[in-house]
């Protein structure tokens, strides 16, 4: 063997050790990629039921909103009817009640005035 042959064998041995040392991180990186693929697969399998549940929830929420809208429109209609009834009551009953109240206040004032006048008048002889 010559010096060149020995140098070639030595270089081949060093190269084999380097390949062995680089193979370990590459194997670990391959395992990381396998775990990442499994995690992505698990997430994609679990996301379908979640999306179906979300769709169902949104659908039910929309149904409830339609019901609430119906209730709101009914309340609005009742409020309008009550407002009209109050206006009708005020127009038909309110005016005469105000006149009666004014009349009774006038009669009361007249009675009080008459009593005051009798008390302050000099006694009859």
Image: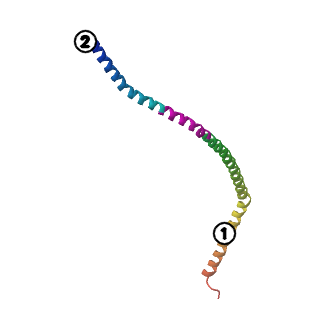
Q: In which quadrant of the rendered image does the C terminus lie?
A: bottom right
Q: Which residue is mark 2?
A: 3
Residue 96 percent location from the top left of the image: 73, 62
Ranked by sequence position, the earlier of labels 1 and 2 is 2
Quadrant containing the N terminus in the rendered view: top left
Q: How many marks?
A: 2
Is 42 covered by the magenta stretch? yes
Most extreme residue toward the left, as rendered?
Answer: 3
Image position of 70 (left or right of 120): right
- Give the extent of the magenta segment: 35-52
Q: Looking at the image, which residue is at 48% across and 31% down?
A: 34
Is residue 68 depicted above or below 117 in this figure?
A: above
Mark 1 Cα shell of 10 Å, populated few (<14), some (14-19), many (≥20) = few
In the picture of the structure, the residue carrying the numbered disc 1 is 105
Residue 35, percent from left and from top:
47, 34
Q: Residue furthest right?
A: 92
88 w.r.t. 67: above or below: below
Label 2: state its secondary structure: helix
Q: Nearer the viewer, residue 44 or 122?
A: 44
Q: Nearer the viewer, residue 72 or 13?
A: 13
Which quadrant of the view contains residue 123?
bottom right
> Does the magenta run of residues contain 6?
no
Q: On the image, which quarter does residue 102 sit in?
A: bottom right
User: Is 2 in front, or is 85?
Assistant: 2
Q: Secondary structure at mark 1?
A: helix
């Amino acid at each position: 063997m010559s010096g060149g042959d020995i140098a070639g064998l030595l270089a081949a041995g060093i190269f084999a050790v380097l390949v062995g040392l680089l193979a370990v991180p590459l194997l670990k990186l391959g395992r990381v990629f396998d775990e990442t693929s499994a995690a992505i697969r698990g997430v994609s399998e679990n996301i379908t039921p979640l999306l179906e549940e979300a769709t169902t929830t949104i659908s039910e929420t929309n149904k409830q909103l339609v019901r609430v809208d119906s209730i709101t429109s009914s309340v609005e209609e009742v409020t309008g009817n009550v407002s009209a009834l109050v206006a009708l009551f005020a127009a038909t009953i309110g005016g005469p009640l105000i006149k009666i109240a004014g009349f009774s206040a006038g009669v009361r004032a007249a009675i009080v005035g008459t009593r005051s006048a009798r008390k302050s008048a000099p006694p009859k002889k």
